[in-house]
Image (cartoon, rainbow, N blue to C red):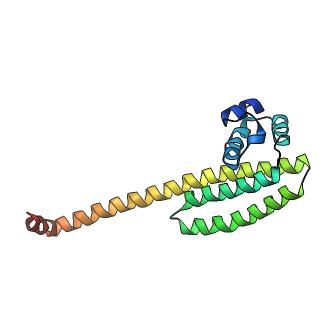
Amino acid sequence: MEKSKTKEQALEAIGLDSFHDLTPEKMVGFLHESMDMPEEELRASIAEIPDFAKLTEGTLDLLKSIGEKALAGNSDSMNKFYEHCGIVHQALADAAKATTCMDEKMMIFNMMKEIVCMEKDKDTENKLYHAFLVGAGVVGVGIAGYVLHRAGILDLIGDEIA
């Protein structure tokens, strides 16, 4: 599939007139939109971002927060996420502060796109995990109800309530 989205189309999709108005929240939207942009358009867009390092750090903080919400209730995944997120966050934030080179900015931007994709995948995985737990709980309640019914306990409880 050919990448054909222009920077103007990307700005329109995220509701901005200029990359000077990009916030961390809007940057997440731009990361999604940029997946359909040719590299030349993407480079031109990134070149217009006034404080790339500050925006990168704010976006990474926001992505961490989104990841935390996606993994809530799954402590093993959450601990691994915290560990990896801290390492990646520090490395990308340091790199963004230290660079003025467009190739390095592109690398940092592309890594943030990968984080967005991984969070989406992890969110889907976590939802499946929670659906499994809910399904297992429903099956467990059903089995317990059947066992209680077969033992005649539900009949006794029914008489007590009536």
Question: 105 or 136, which is in the foreground?
Answer: 105
Asked whether residue 4 is in view, the answer is: no
Residue 125 appears at what percent x and percent y?
A: 55, 55
Vertical side of 18 occupied by 90: above or below: below
Residue 70 appears at what percent x and percent y?
A: 56, 57
Residue under the point 81% across and 43% down:
49
| Quarter where residue 95 is shown | bottom right
Specify whether 25 is left or right of 95.
left
Residue 67 appears at what percent x and percent y?
A: 61, 58
Question: 29 or 137, which is in the foreground?
Answer: 29
Label total for image: 0
Specify whether 149 is left or right of 19.
left
Vertical side of 37 occupied by 57: above or below: below
Residue 101 appears at what percent x and percent y?
A: 92, 49
Residue under the point 53% across and 62% down:
72
Which quadrant would the C terminus be assigned to in this image?
bottom left
| Quarter where residue 9 is shown | top right
Residue under the point 67% across and 50% down:
116
Vertical side of 105 occupied by 8: above or below: above
Specify the farthest residue to the right. Answer: 101
Residue under the point 76% across and 53% down:
56
| Quarter where residue 50 is shown | top right
Asked whether residue 136 is in view, the answer is: yes
